Amino acid sequence: MKSFYITTAIDYVNGSPHLGHAYEKVLTDVIARFRRQMGDRVHFLTGVDEHGQKVQASARERGIPPQQFCDEVSAEFRALLPRLNVANDDFIRTTEARHKRVVAALLQQLFDQGEIYQAEYRGFYSTRQEQFLQDKDRNPDGSWPELFGEVTEITEKNYFFKLAQYQAWLVEFLTKHEDFIFPRYRQKQVLEFLKDPLNDLCISRPRERLEWGIPLPFDPAYVTYVWFDALVNYYSAVADSGQWPADCHVIGKDILVPPHAVYWPIMLHALGLPLPKSLLVHGWWSINGVKMSKSTGNFIEPGEYVAEFGVDALRYFLIREMNVGQDSDFTRAQFLVRYNSELANNLGNLVNRTLNMTTRFAGGAVPAAEVAEDLEKELHALWDKTRAEVIPLCEGFQFHTALERTMAFVTATNAYIEKRAPWKLGKSAAPADVALLRTSLATMAEALRLAVALLQHVTPSTTAKINAVLGYTPGANWPDELAWGTKLTGAKVAAALVLFPRPAPADKAPAKP
Ligand code: MSP
């Protein structure tokens, strides 16, 4: 069995989670579930990034110790995961002993290897981004971009990691491993960034300025720079279980360069540790074209959509709407379009018809197909094509297209029902019509079973509910579930299932963009 270790970014705990955080966790969960279905032994890690200036400042504002603040906010992030149907195997907090121990050990190793030195540093510092800035970061008019918040000039002694000496190695690595970063054009952006010389990385903050961090093992007057601490989570969580390296780090585009594409590979290389196999870089959810973020107040609360429409409707929308890697605007109107047309009127309709007609015309037990005329053959052929396309699409992270194809198959099944018109066949006692009626009932039930098998990693609860009303328990081998066959013959179906109820009228619904 192939192992597959996948991670998400670990979220800052200085605010509550919003839809952008939720998306990344759902996307990673969809990949993890898909890999499990394909037979991999998956390890899925997510967690929270708890150190740093912003957390310290937020805790002070509330007048509570930073650890208590972290405990409260981390609990909120953690509680969101089961609400999103995210089945992670581990959740790491950077304040845990298992993490701090590994960060200290790695820093000590680099120090002993002579990769870390102390020097005087004078520069412009952004508290919001917790990083020193360079002149190239300025706006053309000399001011600092809004993104950096308040920028102050400071001079202090700090510790530096010898990053620059690995620049040529990194360029060569990226040139040789074209598939390291998905989408590929992001890898080109990293190489573009590496055309300018790298500076060594300041990896410490004096304790008098920032207390809330992991002390440097070789000089406790300093704490570890938050990125050096945070990136290590991917390794510290599995350091004892031998699961390193990760197969895939899922991250947003804002944290690719420099942290994940430059610092992290170089840190690992300097430590003599293997590199992750790949980085999957997703885009941003925005509202009216502006990035969703807690600090600007421009965000969607994922819990509200879960409460109103159900977890799978939200998961379906996030995965169907966004082409992984690109940006998407979130609007309630677009959410409702997909909810109504794809989930309620297409999939929901197929479920209702199947249950209803099997109950009405076959006493609630799925009959065996008796004939295969052109209409059936066309649907079988479309299924073969859909299945053959969807698996490679999912392997290549094209989940939005995979869902589109799956829903096209559902649409074709509804069209098949229209053409066969079982409600007409049910009025005839002619043997040919009876055979066609039984065939049509068997065909719609089997098509529904197959379609929901392809939706399983995106909408796991819906798939389970539909299988339950079809009186069906899927086998353990998912690829086997995708063969058109007779698995449902004789199954006792339920009379009805309300899956995607009509949303409340707009005036009763929470105000949304
Ligand atoms: N703590 C760092 C990551 C450390 S990883 C070793 C961080 N935290 S964050 O809370 O700001 O962001 C966490 C993840 O959420 C990032 O991958 C980020 O890209 C993602 N998102 C935050 N806002 C987002 C959107 N509006 N849309 C999609 N994802 C976005 O960065």
Image (cartoon, rainbow, N blue to C red):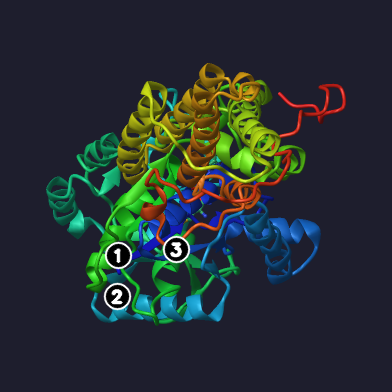
Q: Nearer the viewer, residue 8 or 353?
A: 353
Q: Nearer the viewer, residue 244 or 16?
A: 244
C-beta proximity under 8 Å, tags 1 and 3 = no
Tell me residue 196's x, y (percent): 22, 41
Tell me residue 72's x, y (percent): 73, 64
Q: Is mark 1 within 8 Å of ligand 1?
A: no
Q: Is mark 3 within 8 Å of ligand 1?
A: no
Circle 1 residue = 267
Task: Mark yes or no: residue 348 visible.
Answer: yes
Tell me residue 171's x, y (percent): 16, 49
In this picture, is 105 found above or below 367?
below
Circle 3 residue = 476
Neighbour class for label 2 at 10 Å: few (<14), some, many (≥20)? some
Q: Quadrant of the C terminus?
A: top right
Mark 1 lies on a secondary structure that is helix
Circle 2 residue = 110
Tell me residue 130's x, y (percent): 51, 52
Q: Nearer the viewer, residue 325 or 441?
A: 441
C-beta proximity under 8 Å, tags 1 and 2 = yes
